[in-house]
Amino acid sequence: MFDLPTEPINFADILEKRKESARNTIREASVDEIRTLVAELYPDGNHPFVEIFSKFIEEHRSERIFRGQTSDGIGFVYYPKSNTGIWYQYVGKVPGVGRLGPNGLKALAEIMAETGRA
């Protein structure tokens, strides 16, 4: 019925895979690209997060923007200057969206420093 893992989950391995895939996929993005992303996530434009995300984009429009994806399908938008960002992931056809937390921000700041983009 359920495909449960036979071995304990190693969260350190999961986090390392996420960080490595983020390192390999992170790239600079434009404000227009991020606006398009919002429209793709919420095509009807009526979801409350559209306004929140749009305001967030405007507040940070003068900053460089980076975008990437982790090995398990979590997309992210990262603003290194203010060390803030947003994650998104589809669960079926429904997008989940939220602010990047401290661990994700720390990992992305490390990636930016390692790749000379900080």
Image (tube, rainbow, N blue to C red):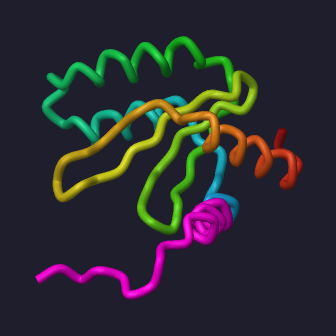
Say if 21 sits above or below 85 in the image.
below
Number of marks drawn: 0
Q: Is residue 9 left or right of residue 118?
A: left
Quadrant of the image occupied by residue 52: top left
x and y percentages locating residue 45 in the rendered image: 19, 26
Q: Which one is nearer the viewer's eye here, 74 or 36?
A: 74
Say if 7 sits above or below 29 in the image.
below
Q: Which image quadrant: the C terminus?
A: top right
Quadrant of the image occupied by residue 73: bottom left
Q: Is residue 9 magenta?
A: yes
What residue do we see at 84% from left, 54% from top?
Answer: 115
What residue do we see at 40% from left, 33% from top?
Answer: 98
Q: Which one is nearer the viewer's eye here, 1 or 63?
A: 1
Q: Is residue 48 left or right of residue 89?
A: left
x and y percentages locating residue 43 in the rendered image: 19, 37
What residue do we see at 38% from left, 40% from top?
Answer: 37
x and y percentages locating residue 17 in the rendered image: 61, 69
Q: Is residue 3 left or right of residue 29?
A: left
What residue do we see at 48% from left, 73% from top?
Answer: 9
Q: Which image quadrant: the N terminus?
A: bottom left
Say if 72 sits above or below 44 in the image.
below
x and y percentages locating residue 53 in the rendered image: 39, 23
- What span is in magenta? 1-21
> Residue placed farthest to the bottom in the image?
6
Q: Is residue 10 magenta?
A: yes
